[in-house]
Amino acid sequence: MTMTAFDPPIRHSASATLAMLLADSRLPAGAHVSSNSLEAGLRYGLGPVEVADYMCTRMETVTRVEAGTAVIARNSALDRSGSAAGLEAVEAEWAARTPSAALREIAVALGAGLTRIGTVLWPQTNEVLRGRHMPRPIVLGVIAAFAGISADDLVRLVAYDDAQTVAAAMLKLEPTDPIRVTGWVLDACAAMEAYVADLSMLTHPAALPAAGAPLIEDWAEAQSALPRRLFRA
């Protein structure tokens, strides 16, 4: 369905969550351009049989950072009086916990694509994001604020998006049974459940988890330098 300027924004939480889930690999704003470092990982020592564990490891490390960032950004956007300064503080803390320049660069690029989607479906986000180049988790958090997505559902959405991005890349790089890979996604999302309660309660940027993953960061840097690749990151 084509949306026009006269169409009402999506407000119902279930509809908004569904719309965001559909955006992960079906629009050129996520899994079409990113493999979450899987492509480089497969070239530099990660075995195809280890990809399920890789998804779960991401949940314990980089995905926790992304999810926490999104939750705090959501809270900042809901606080209309200080959203601009609040988002800048969130971005600074996220960047400090994302040492890979390649990861930061792709996050901003993905954020730009998500901003274009979000400002059409939820025009209120334009009040906060207009002219600002924010990384994907912050944009996702702002959209969640105006789309009526709860903090705990936002954490789960970030987890699903992360795992599904790896899964979509896996099926292109090392084709295998899609049902099997879908099981990996479900297992990874289940692994994130242990962190949902704590992450959904975050309100201050300084409280963002510092869950580093040096090898994932290293693969991201290697990915950015691959001479022949399917994915940007």
Image: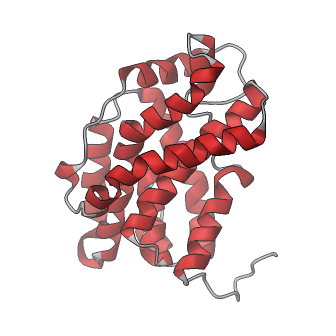
Q: What residue occupies the far right of the structure in this picture?
A: 1
- Residue 145 visible: yes
Task: Pick the quarter of the image with the N terminus.
Answer: bottom right
Image coords of residue 112 (percent x, y) = 56, 52
**Residue at 71 percent of width and 21 percent of height:** 229
**Residue at 58 percent of width and 57 percent of height:** 114
Image coords of residue 85 (percent x, y) = 25, 62
Question: Vertically, is 169 above or below 29?
Answer: above
Query: Does residue 52 appear to the left or right of 58 in the view shown?
Result: right
Q: Quadrant of residue 141?
A: bottom left
Question: Vertically, is 78 above or below 38?
Answer: below
Total labels drawn: 0
Image coords of residue 80 (percent x, y) = 30, 77
* Colour basis: secondary structure
Q: Quadrant of residue 22?
A: bottom right
**Residue at 70 percent of width and 38 percent of height:** 180
- Residue 33 visible: no
Query: Does residue 166 appear to the left or right of 108 in the view shown?
Result: right
Q: Nearest the camera: 45 or 187?
A: 187
Image coords of residue 87 (percent x, y) = 31, 59
**Residue at 36 percent of width and 21 percent of height:** 214
Task: Pick the quarter of the image with the C terminus.
Answer: top right
